[in-house]
Image (tube, rainbow, N blue to C red):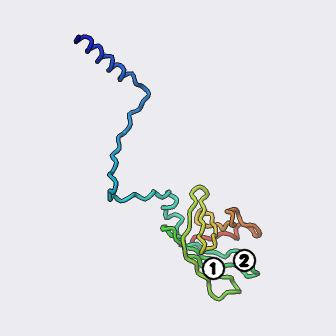
Amino acid sequence: MKSIQLLCLIAALAMIGCKDGEKPTATQDIAPTGATEPAMSPQMPPEKTSAAWMGKYAGVLPCWNECKGLKTEIEVRNDSTYTLSSQALGQEDKPRIFKGTFNFNTAKKTITLDAEGDHLKFLVNDGMLKKLDKFGDPEQGAPQEKYLLKKVQ
């Protein structure tokens, strides 16, 4: 009788040992409902957290209203906020100031301002912002270098 029990035990161990291809799964402790542990925020992409492209940009963009140009300054900050200053040269005595938030598209490396900034889009590129049209394409109507804002801070 003992030999039958021993034989069954060996067979069971052999069957357990034959399971190949399965990887052991890690156990995970699940916090009880109502746990007060703070949730972690998603990690920002390196392009977003990098101070390399954060800062102040300035330049004169082409104007469609027969002005001499749009004197434009924009400051983009690491907390996804911006301040935009725009003045039609020869038509406005002082700049219009817009403040709000922006979204950064990591794949396209573009900044899109919120409604306060009229959903303007800019391509982030080596110490410059290039103004894009409302679809995210290069602006038409003037040489492309006219749509560049250079980093000043």
Which amino acid, by three-letter code, is at mark 1? Answer: Ser
Task: Answer with left or right where residue 96 lies relative to residue 54.
Answer: right
> Mark 2 to mark 1: distance in Å?
11 Å
With respect to residue 117, does 108 lie above or below? above
- Image quadrant containing the N terminus: top left
Residue 63 bears which disc, if any?
Answer: 2
Instruction: Tell me the quarter of the picture where residue 147 sits.
Output: bottom right
With respect to residue 37, does 101 lie above or below? below
Q: Which element type, helix, strand or loop, lies under badge 1?
A: strand
Instruction: Tell me the quarter of the picture where residue 129 sits.
Output: bottom right
Instruction: Please provide percent x and percent y for residue 140.
Output: 75, 67
Single out the residue that lies furthest toward the left: 2
Mark 2 surroundings within 10 Å by alpha-carbon count, few (fewer than 14), some (14 through 19), many (20 or more): some
Q: Is residue 152 visible?
A: no
Residue highlighted by disc 1: 86
Labels 2 & 1 near each other (Cβ < 8 A): no
* Dot placed on the residue nearer the N-terminal end, 2 or 1: 2
* Camera-side residue of 50 and 153: 50
* Camera-side residue of 6 and 75: 6
